[in-house]
Image (spheres, rainbow, N blue to C red):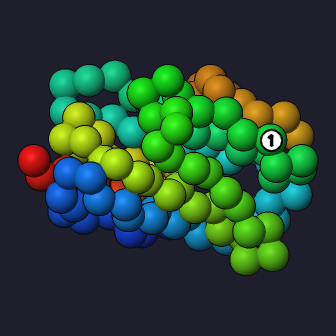
């Protein structure tokens, strides 16, 4: 059974730099694309960062480019999202997702498995 478990969320002050983790089980990262998405109340789901576990290529949403970094540890089957210079508008539930592709996937509908999400709240 495929499972994705996010952790590392919580209440963070503006300007903070938390790290989110997504631990995967039930499959190996080889030849998968992994993405981080977020959704704030009343807003649409937004793609944050994407990575190909095959070649390590990454892609970022415009709102986080230069502030967030996605990385993967294939041996640990874990993906990370390092968040820097957090702003109150980064407040959302953050989800990781996995899709079968050797390339980066930026479309949320193409992801096959999703975690339960972790809340990140940024206080001003």
User: Residue at label 1?
Assistant: 57
Quadrant in which the N terminus appears:
bottom right
Find residue 74 and report its image quarter: bottom right
Count residues near mark 1 (Cα–Cα under 10 Å), then give few for <14, some for 14-19, many for 20+.
Answer: some
Q: 116 left or right of 103?
A: left
Q: Residue at x 57, y 50 (%)?
A: 69
Figure disc tally: 1
- Say whether residue 70 is visible: yes
Of residues 98 and 3, which is closer to you in this image? 98
Q: Residue at x 41, y 52 (%)?
A: 84
Image height check: is 44 above or below 115?
above
Q: Residue furthest bottom?
A: 76
Q: Secondary structure at mark 1?
A: loop
Vertical position of residue 12 compared to residue 56: above or below: below
- Indicate the position of residue 44 as horizontal and vertical percent values: 34, 22
The residue shown at (42%, 27%) is: 63
Give 105 or 61, whichever is nearer the viewer: 61
| Residue 86 in the image, given as x and y percentages of width and height | 30, 48
**x 18%, y 58%: residue:** 13
- Asked whether the viewer can see residue 24, the reply is no
Rendered view: 41 above or below 34 = above
Q: Is residue 42 left or right of residue 68?
A: left
């Amino acid at each position: 059974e495929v499972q994705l478990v996010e952790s590392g969320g919580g209440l963070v002050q503006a300007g903070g730099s938390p790290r989110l983790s997504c631990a995967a089980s039930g499959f190996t990262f080889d030849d998968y694309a992994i993405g981080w998405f977020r959704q704030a109340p009343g807003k649409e789901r937004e793609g944050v960062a994407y990575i190909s576990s095959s070649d390590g290529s990454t892609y970022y949403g415009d709102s986080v480019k230069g502030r967030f970094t996605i990385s993967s540890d294939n041996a640990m089957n874990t993906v990370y999202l390092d968040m820097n210079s957090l702003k109150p508008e980064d407040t959302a539930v953050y989800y990781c997702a996995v899709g079968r592709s050797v390339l980066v996937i930026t479309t949320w509908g193409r992801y096959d498995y999703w975690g339960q999400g972790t809340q990140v709240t940024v206080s001003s």
